[in-house]
Amino acid sequence: MKITNHVKINLPAHVGNEGFARAAVAAFCAPLSPSIEEINDIKTAVSEAVTNVIVHAYPEKDGEIDVEVVIYDDKLISITVTDAGIGLIDPDQAMKPFFTTKSAEEHSGMGFTIMEAFMDELDVRSELGRGTRVTMRKAIKQHA
């Protein structure tokens, strides 16, 4: 596969920046002419990934979020959201529906489940004390 475009965005892990990340990624993907459903899927998945960082990665300090978007062959989008936060104790457990380390009244524990449902592929890598990397991929269908 050939990289046809790419972008990297670095932003503080502050509430509200998930909206910027989702809008920036959507705008970057727009030249591929995704359907409304495809672009909404991408926006939702990015919002969930960035929100996870804001809520969970940096409980006691300020941190940063890296968002990288790579477009392959003008049809496959790869989005990687990376933090240098506390990491996940058990990524497999964290990916189960309704699992949350926060209060159930405030958080549903559905972030990874939503990302997986809206994207074609989801890969989560994490190391305690070093951070988490979430990579999501989605093929954009050619629309006539």
Image: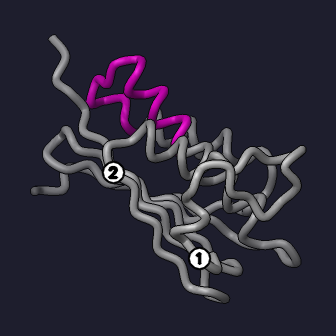
Q: What residue is shown with label 2?
A: 121
Contact check, label 2 and label 1, Cβ < 8 Å: no
Left or right position of 89 against 39: right
Mark 2–mark 1 distance (CA, rounded to whole Å): 19 Å
Disc 1 element: loop
Magenta stretch, main secondary structure class: helix
Left or right position of 56 against 89: right
Which residue reaches farthest bottom? 129
Classify mark 2: residues with Cα within 10 Å, few (<14), some (14-19) or many (20+): some
Nearer the observer, disc 2 or disc 1?
Answer: 1
Q: Which residue is found at the position 61% from the left and 72% from the top?
A: 83
Give how far across and how far down residue 89 sits, in percent.
Answer: 64, 80
Give how far across and how far down residue 14 sits, in percent.
Answer: 79, 57
Left or right position of 3 against 99: left
Q: Which segment is the magenta one?
A: 28-45
Q: Amino acid at mark 2?
A: Glu
Q: Which residue is found at the position 41% from the left and 20% from the top?
A: 37
Classify mark 1: residues with Cα within 10 Å, few (<14), some (14-19) or many (20+): few
Q: Earlier in the sequence, mark 2 or mark 1?
A: 1
Residue 82 falls in which quadrant of the image?
Answer: bottom right
Q: Quadrant of the N terminus?
A: bottom left
Disc 2 element: strand
**Front-most of 69 and 91?**
91
Mark sitting on residue 90: 1
